[in-house]
Image: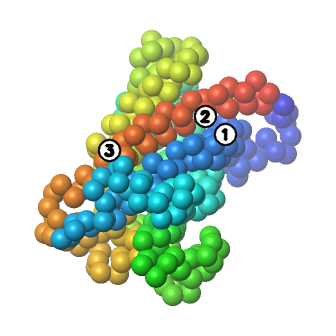
Amino acid sequence: MVIPSDSPTMKLYSSGFLPSQKTLKGIVAGGFTGGIEICITFPTEFVKTQLQLDEKSIKPRYSGIIDCVKQTVDSHGVKGLYRGLSVLLYGSIPKSAVRFGSFEALKNHFSDPVTGNLTPSKRFFCGMGAGVSEAILVVTPMETVKVKFIDDIQNPAGPKFKGFFHGVGTIIKTQGFGGIYQGLTATIIKQGSNQAIRFFVVETLKDWYRGGDSKKKVNKLITGCFGAVAGAASVFGNNPVDVVKTRMQSLEASKYKSTFDCALKIVKHEGIAAFYKGTVPRLSRVCLDVGITFMIYDTLMEVFNSVWKT
């Protein structure tokens, strides 16, 4: 599909009123990528969130990953590990669309016009821009609702949220729209650093593999491996922020005055080690998540490029 350069649509593209076709391809491919990926990796996200919500007390609810899975399955069946999936599924499609669309737009703007490559600093900046965009537009409300849904399953009296729309409606009714935007600052920091690290690592490894030739194809399995490395780097780089974000979005978030206050209370009452709760399940999930995501995205972009000419 080729749009004539003198068409009204292309005039809008060139004037800046519409995103470029490459950005649009990134948005569409990103959306499909997000939906497929979250259906594969959600149980690990569920376990990670449960462990992070399990604050240190006289007797913690879970003794570890296996115990968390066992208790959940015993109480709610295997489907209990998918509690909150609908929230992430509704949000993952636009989240991934915004992430890759933003990155493609920034990359298109900052890349070298001849080679198409980005300098290391620009790779980091473009990734950060993609992360901040998704944090503000999609991730914060999506993550807040997801955490509240997972937290709700621990309610001794039984879950009070009957479904996605009932849950969101209840949150907004009792807490206002601010109730689905809790932890915005922590989420911006988390997503900005996440994507800055991930895109930087993946783009750097791809550039190394191609020897500087931006047109050389990278094998999809190798792309997946590069994504897994990038995912691991982001976990070790910002897990403390992820823990704070999770606490700020829980059903008991009101006991924290701010993101900084939440971090201080965690240190005071639980120690530094609490910032690395859920690291192992998060590490396994993120490595799989990021590896699969970049493999799917690159595959879809390759297909789109063959039928959607720019």
Query: What is the CA distance from the residue labelled 2 to the residue labelled 1?
Result: 6 Å
- Answer with mark 2 or mark 1, whichever residue precedes in sequence: 1
State left or right for residue 42 relative to residue 101.
Answer: left
The residue located at (40%, 40%) in the rendering is 284
| Residue 4, x across and y down, in percent | 85, 33
The residue located at (53%, 41%) in the rendering is 103
Instruction: Say how many tags the image has.
Output: 3
Q: Amino acid at mark 2?
A: Tyr
Question: Compared to 166, does 235 lie above or below?
Answer: above
Question: Compared to 116, does 252 lie above or below?
Answer: below
Q: Can residue 114 be seen from the camera position used here?
A: no
**Disc 2 to disc 1: CB gap under 8 Å:** yes
Q: Which residue is mark 3?
A: 280
What number is the disc on residue 297? 2
Of residues 292 and 121, the one nearer the viewer is 292
Q: Which residue is mark 1?
A: 29
Foreground tag (3 vs 1): 3
Query: What is the CA distance from the residue labelled 2 to the residue labelled 3?
Result: 25 Å
State left or right for residue 239 relative to residue 157.
Answer: left
**Which type of secondary structure does the marked residue at label 1 adopt?**
helix
Foreground tag (2 vs 3): 3
| Residue 260, x across and y down, in percent | 24, 69
In which quadrant is the C terminus drawn?
Answer: top right
Q: Amino acid at mark 1?
A: Ala
**Disc 3 to disc 1: CB gap under 8 Å:** no
The residue located at (35%, 50%) in the rendering is 65
Question: Compared to 264, does 36 lie above or below?
Answer: above
What number is the disc on residue 257? none
**Which type of secondary structure does the marked residue at label 3 adopt?**
helix
Q: Can residue 210 be seen from the camera position used here?
A: yes
The residue located at (58%, 38%) in the rendering is 104
